Image (cartoon, rainbow, N blue to C red):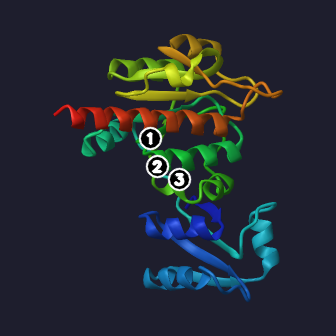
Amino acid sequence: MAEDIIAGRNSVTEALRSERSINKILVQDGAKGGSIGEIIAAAKAKNILIDYVKQEKLDKLVPGMRHQGIVAMVAPIAFQTLDDVFAKAAAKNEDPFILLLDELQDPQNVGALIRTADAAGVHGVLMPKRRSCPLNAVVAKISAGAVEYVPVVQIGNIAQAIEDLQSRGCWVIGADMDGEEHYTVNMTGPLVLVIGAEGKGLGRLVKQKCDTIASIPMGGGVSSLNASAAGAILMYEAVRQRRMAGKELWLNT
């Protein structure tokens, strides 16, 4: 049976809180304090197997990662559909708010974007099946467990996916330095934010398919932000605008 590995106390805690199937938890010999006891108690309550192992074994399972003395063997992330994302928005009586990642391959950026997406109330994250980083242990740890809660949809052709989203009534905004300053762009209503890949940004055809291009003003010597920082700024500008629009609607009723 295929399984993934997640590491770190936040990631394992959120996996336990979610409905994700956990096959086994490995705890470093002598690890205690903080949330370790709570994790062990929660795992025992769910009848999850717990093995106590030497640090070297955890180091080999997740090389280069700060595992904090705990690793879990879990079922792979269950990808969802675009219909699931729209249903989630409808259940909350909200306009769809979607993040589309254009071939991002750095797990640090993907994890950080998923964490921000969860905090900002994004209904789903779309990632192409090819030329995207897998949802691995690094993504799970950097997302602080948010990958357990934000629906992730694997898509094929990005340009075709954008056309599908537009046919469903979404306004698609791409992030690029050639666009309008982001705080002048309307981000209320059904919305898709497209974040380009590290280094090369949005693909040419993807950029052409977007309804609007939004840029982030840069006032220093550096010409651009990394993908996760740019995505966070745009997501929270959308949150600000949508909340302000909601307040105006409430005041006028």
Q: Which mark is residue 150?
A: 2
**Separation of disc 2 and disc 3 at Cα?**
6 Å
Measuring from the top left, give residue 29's x and y in whole percent. Answer: 73, 87
Tally of numbered tags? 3
Q: How crowded is mark 2: few (under 14 residues within 10 Å), some or many (20 or more)?
A: many
Residue pictured at 80% horizontal, 69% vertical: 59
- Locate residue 54 relative to residue 133 in the image: left or right: right
- Pointer 2 with pointer 3, Cβ within 8 A: yes
Measuring from the top left, give residue 40's x and y in whole percent. Answer: 55, 83
Amino acid type, mark 2: Val
Q: How crowded is mark 1: few (under 14 residues within 10 Å), some or many (20 or more)?
A: many
Residue pictured at 44% horizontal, 42% vertical: 122
Q: In this view, does 152 lie above or below 238?
A: below
Secondary element at image label 2: loop
Which image quadrant for residue 226? top right
Dot placed on the residue nearer the N-terminal end, 3 or 1 = 1
Amino acid type, mark 1: Gly
Q: Mark 1 points at which residue?
A: 124
Q: Which mark is residue 207?
A: none
Q: Please say whether residue 210 is visible from this viewpoint.
A: no
**Separation of disc 3 and disc 1 at Cα?**
10 Å
Q: Mark 3 points at which residue?
A: 147
- Pointer 2 with pointer 1, Cβ within 8 A: yes
Which image quadrant for residue 242? top left
Q: Is residue 15 above or below residue 217?
A: below
Q: Please say whether residue 72 is visible from this viewpoint.
A: yes
